[in-house]
């Protein structure tokens, strides 16, 4: 097995793993944070919060691993774009880490809120609302970084024909939708579920293709 084939399999497995950890982490956190009376439920459900934070942190590490692993392939076609893609995934990782600080802060607030008197509850609720907003804002900014970098990435895939162009087009469509979703999220509009779907399709088809078929090296080989 040549090195490019190994890279393709590694990248494919990392993308599938990051998708799984993201879904598990956001699902665990969302099940608690999206509750109408989340401060009452956070402390009793601390295992869900800690589990969600753990999987989100795993995602933050894996996304950098994806960019690091595929960099040797991408730089052979356009090193500047490869570096840009790597940089945006690092930014995404940092923002994901920032986003999971809020749920940990909310755990401490939940304990105080439960034991506070009626006059003190509004104080903790105000702080909690700010923390929730910060959590989702950091996450939307992470998705903004991901979408910008991935649009560059998919355009490079399209130009280089490293994978079938149809897959690259699906990626361009998917990350354009994600870019729109993240921008809407930053200004307070939330229709993310709909706009995530095209990107989710790419992040399923692309890694499976890499694992089964690998990168198309015909064009690069013929140009030597």
Image (tube, rainbow, N blue to C red):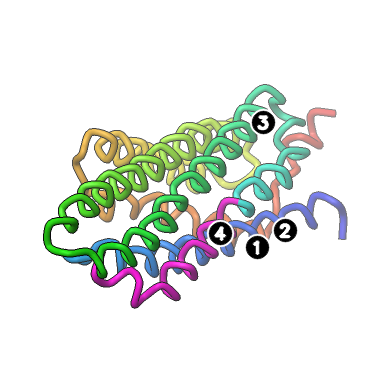
Describe the element under mark 4 as helix, strand or loop: helix
* Pick the front one: 2 or 136: 136
Sequence-first disc among 3 and 1 = 1
Sequence-first disc among 3 and 4 = 4
Where's residue 12, x and y in %? 64, 58
Q: Which residue is drawn at 24% across and 62% down?
A: 34
Number of on-image labels: 4
Residue, disc 1? 13
Graded by Cα atoms within 10 Å as few (under 14), some (14 to 19) or many (20 or more), the crowding at tag 4 reads many
Is 71 magenta? The answer is: no
Q: Distance between the residues labelled 2 and 1?
A: 5 Å
Is 58 magenta? The answer is: yes
From the viewer's perspective, is the residue at label 3 or at label 4 nearer?
4
Q: Is residue 118 left or right of residue 175?
A: left
Residue, disc 4? 18
Q: How far apart are marks 1 and 4 (CA)?
A: 9 Å
Graded by Cα atoms within 10 Å as few (under 14), some (14 to 19) or many (20 or more), the crowding at tag 2 reads some
Residue, disc 2? 10
Q: Distance between the residues labelled 4 and 2?
A: 12 Å
Where's residue 177, x and y in %? 33, 41
């Amino acid at each position: 097995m040549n090195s490019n084939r190994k890279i393709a399999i590694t990248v494919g497995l990392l993308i599938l793993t990051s998708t799984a950890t993201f879904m598990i982490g956001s699902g665990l956190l969302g099940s608690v944070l999206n509750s109408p009376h989340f401060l009452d439920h956070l402390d009793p459900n601390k295992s869900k919060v800690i589990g969600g934070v753990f999987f989100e942190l795993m995602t933050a590490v894996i996304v950098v691993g994806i960019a690091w692993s595929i960099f040797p392939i991408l730089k052979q076609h356009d090193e500047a774009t490869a570096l840009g893609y790597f940089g945006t995934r690092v930014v995404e990782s940092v923002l994901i880490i920032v986003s999971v600080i809020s749920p940990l802060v909310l755990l401490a607030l939940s304990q105080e809120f439960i034991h506070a008197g009626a006059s003190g509850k509004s104080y903790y609720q105000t702080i909690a609302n700010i923390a929730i907003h910060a959590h989702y804002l950091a996450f939307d900014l992470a998705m903004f970084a991901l979408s910008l970098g991935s649009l560059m990435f998919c355009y490079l895939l399209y130009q280089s024909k490293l994978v079938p162009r149809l897959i690259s087009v699906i990626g361009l469509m998917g990350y354009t939708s994600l870019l729109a979703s993240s921008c809407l999220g930053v200004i307070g509009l939330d229709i993310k579920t709909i706009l995530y779907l095209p990107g989710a399709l790419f992040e399923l088809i692309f890694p499976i293709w890499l694992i089964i078929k690998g990168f198309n090296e015909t064009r690069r080989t013929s140009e030597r």
